[in-house]
Image (cartoon, rainbow, N blue to C red):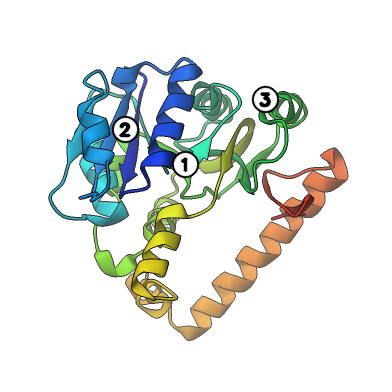
Amino acid sequence: MRYRIVIPVLNQLHFTRQCVENLLAHGTPPEAILVIDNGSSDDTPAWLASMPQLPSVRNPVNLGCGGAWTQGALLSGEADWVVLLNNDIVSGHAFVPAMLDAADRFGLDVVSCAMVERELDYPLETFTAEFVAEMRDVLRRGWFHGVCFAVRRPVFERIGFPDTDRLLFGREDSEFLWRCRRHDVPVGTVGAALLHHFGSITQDAIRRETGVRKFGDHRYFYARIGLNWWGRQRAKFARKAQTRRWVHEERAAHGRTLHMVHAGGGWEHR
């Protein structure tokens, strides 16, 4: 099997069903999808039980994103690539094969696709075709995002699986990216594939239910990767400067970027 798509979920059945149906509609075989139910209390378990052709695992407790990613990766031992995917996405094409083809072309071992976030009030299929035709050769080397990233199997053998530390809440992808950079794993985000991300649906629901405004502790994350206060400031400055360069170069050459936000009828480039 070339790839297995691992989708951790916690409630939000509408988005899970929409994501899975979108993948199937664009040719993804059901057996290439693995849904990890992190203890949902809505109708998610019943829906998964009604889909026997769709592989799934139900955890009695919420293992967190990192725990579910690692669980899915361990259960996908036959796949060359493990694609770690949020459930609050849709796409206008078969984005996973397109993303992996681009990774092979650019020599990447971890890869993300381009992304539009927030409001889906534009013609997705038409926009996607135009975007990919224009941006297929664009690459942001050295960065991937946590909404969707694919990992070539040998990377896990080399640097380990995503961190299962629950105190990293929301920063598991950043910790994994840091490890990739430290060990010179080639990573990047490509314009040859595009998805639409509705935007942290599960985390927003948890915030509303619990009243928690911010998850995790950024100081704990930076301590885990060995950065003191000055190291954090240098890392933030370097990241923001690099992002500004990417945005400037992509907009100048193509009029769009690999990370856009669509809200209120306008576009923001990130």
Q: Secondary structure at mark 2?
A: helix
**Nearest the eye: 79 or 96:** 96
Query: For the residue marked with disc 1, what is the amino acid?
Result: Cys
Q: Quadrant of the N terminus?
A: top left
User: Which residue position holds label 2?
Assistant: 153
10 Å crowding of disc 3: few (<14), some (14-19), many (20+):
few
Looking at the figure, which quarter contains the C terminus?
bottom right
Of callouts 3 and 1, the N-terminal one: 3
Front: mark 2 or 3: 3
x and y, in percent, of residue 52 in the image:
21, 21
Q: Which residue is mark 3?
A: 125
Residue 147: give x, y in percent of width and height: 48, 47
Marks 2 and 1, the one that precedes in the sequence: 1
Front position among marks 2 and 1: 1
Residue drawn where x is 59% and y is 22% of the image: 93
Q: CA distance from mark 3 to mark 1?
A: 19 Å
Q: How far apart, in angstroms, are the residues tagged by discs 2 and 3? A: 31 Å
Residue 124's mark? none
Q: What residue sits right under mark 1 in the picture?
A: 148
Mark closest to the chain's N terminus, 2 or 3 = 3
